[in-house]
Image (cartoon, rainbow, N blue to C red):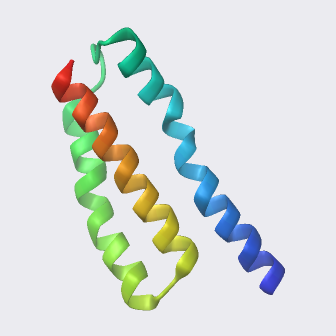
Amino acid sequence: MAKFEHFMTLIAFIYPFSSLPQIIDIYTKKSAENVSLLTWVLYFLFLIPFLKYSILRKDKPLIIMYSMWSIVYIVIIAGILIY
């Protein structure tokens, strides 16, 4: 089980990088056209209880993943608001 837990921690760290193309697209083109602010705000708002739950459970892979997703969402929301 320990190996699988290490693997899941790695996946939890890597998974949020799946939104990197969206971040790069917004900031390099300096445009958030066709990117829904409402969608990304809802993603962020619904993430909050999951992050709290993972902290209460002291589930390290989930804490890492949800913390990183919160950063991703904030960066994308900021990009939408800026551009």
Specify whether residue 1 is in view.
no
Closer to the camera in the image, 39 or 20: 20
Snapshot quadrant of residue 70: bottom left
Q: Is residue 48 visible to us here? A: yes
The quarter of the picture where the C terminus appears is top left
User: In the image, 11: left or right of 52?
Assistant: right
- Residue at image x 52%, y 49%? 16
The relative height of residue 16 versus residue 20 in the rendered view (above or below) is below
Residue 51 at x, y percent in the picture: 36, 71
Which residue is painted at 67% across and 59% down in the image?
A: 11
Residue 20: horizontal and vertical position, in percent?
Answer: 51, 34
Q: Quadrant of the N terminus?
A: bottom right
The residue under the point 23% across, 27% down is 80
Is residue 57 shown left or right of residue 46?
right
Residue 25 at x, y percent in the picture: 44, 18
Residue plotted at (46% across, 23% down): 24
55, above or below 51, in the image: below
Residue 37 placed where, x, y %? 21, 32
The image quadrant of residue 4 is: bottom right
Quick check: 3 left or right of 23?
Answer: right
In screen coordinates, is 34 left or right of 54?
A: left
63, 36: nearer the viewer: 63
